[in-house]
Image (cartoon, rainbow, N blue to C red):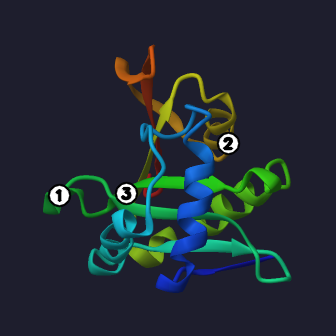
Amino acid sequence: MTIREATIDDLPQIVSIYNESIPGRLSTADLDPQTLASRSDWFLSFAEDERPFWVCENEDGNMMGWLCFKSFYGRCAYRGTVEVSIYISYQHHRMGIANSLMEYAIASAATWGIDNITAFVFSQNEGSIKLFQKFGFEKWGHLPNIAKLDDTRCNLEIWGLGLDQ
């Protein structure tokens, strides 16, 4: 397994893995599949904001998952705080890919000037919550019924990890 920085050539696989998660209504508030066109500017913003975006590949060069840090909030005082997003291809779930990406990202955070990592997780997403708890994240906030996925209201939890404490 190899973890490396993503390139624009990875975008089709990144979007494909992301789109796999939409029907499950567990890990994203997007309700419809995304396109390459709709995600192109989003992807390019990581380089503009100097935020990392990593992909994890198997020995055949097939992408198994990805993780990125995006800016938490647009004010300078929050520069050291990021929001993490992590998506693993369904065929690679329960293979330790998420753990490997999280370990890599946390170990690399200081080189990117990151002091705090936040994660926004639907409360019903027990797998993601367990992953973040495993890495020392604590529940920093709860937003009740903030999202409506089809006919279901969902709570959003904010998980956080302080790296400079």
> Is label 2 in a helix, a strand or a loop?
helix
Q: Which mark is residue 48?
A: none
What is the C-alpha distance between the residues marked 3 and 1?
11 Å
Where is residue 133 shown, x and y percent of the image? 63, 37
> Is label 3 in a helix, a strand or a loop?
strand
What is the C-alpha distance between the residues marked 2 and 1?
27 Å
The tag earlier along the polypeptide, 3 or 1, is 1
**From what the image shows, is residue 28 above or below residue 6?**
above
Q: Amino acid at mark 2?
A: Leu
Judge the density around disc 1: few (<14), some (14-19), many (≥20) Cα neighbours within 10 Å: few
Q: Residue at x 44, y 62 (%)?
A: 35
**Residue under numbered circle 3:** 82
The tag earlier along the polypeptide, 2 or 1, is 1
Judge the density around disc 3: few (<14), some (14-19), many (≥20) Cα neighbours within 10 Å: many
Q: Nearer the viewer, residue 143 or 162?
A: 143
Q: Residue at x 33, y 78 (%)?
A: 50
> Is label 1 in a helix, a strand or a loop?
loop
Q: Nearer the viewer, residue 122 or 137?
A: 122
Q: Residue at x 53, y 85 (%)?
A: 9
**Residue under numbered circle 2:** 131
Quarter holding residue 61: bottom right
Quarter holding residue 116: bottom left
**Residue under numbered circle 1:** 74
The tag earlier along the polypeptide, 2 or 3, is 3
Q: Is residue 85 left or right of residue 20?
A: left
Where is residue 78 shown, x and y percent of the image? 23, 56
Q: Nearer the viewer, residue 97 or 148?
A: 148
Quarter holding residue 34: bottom left
Q: Amino acid at mark 1?
A: Gly
What is the C-alpha distance between the residues marked 2 and 3?
17 Å
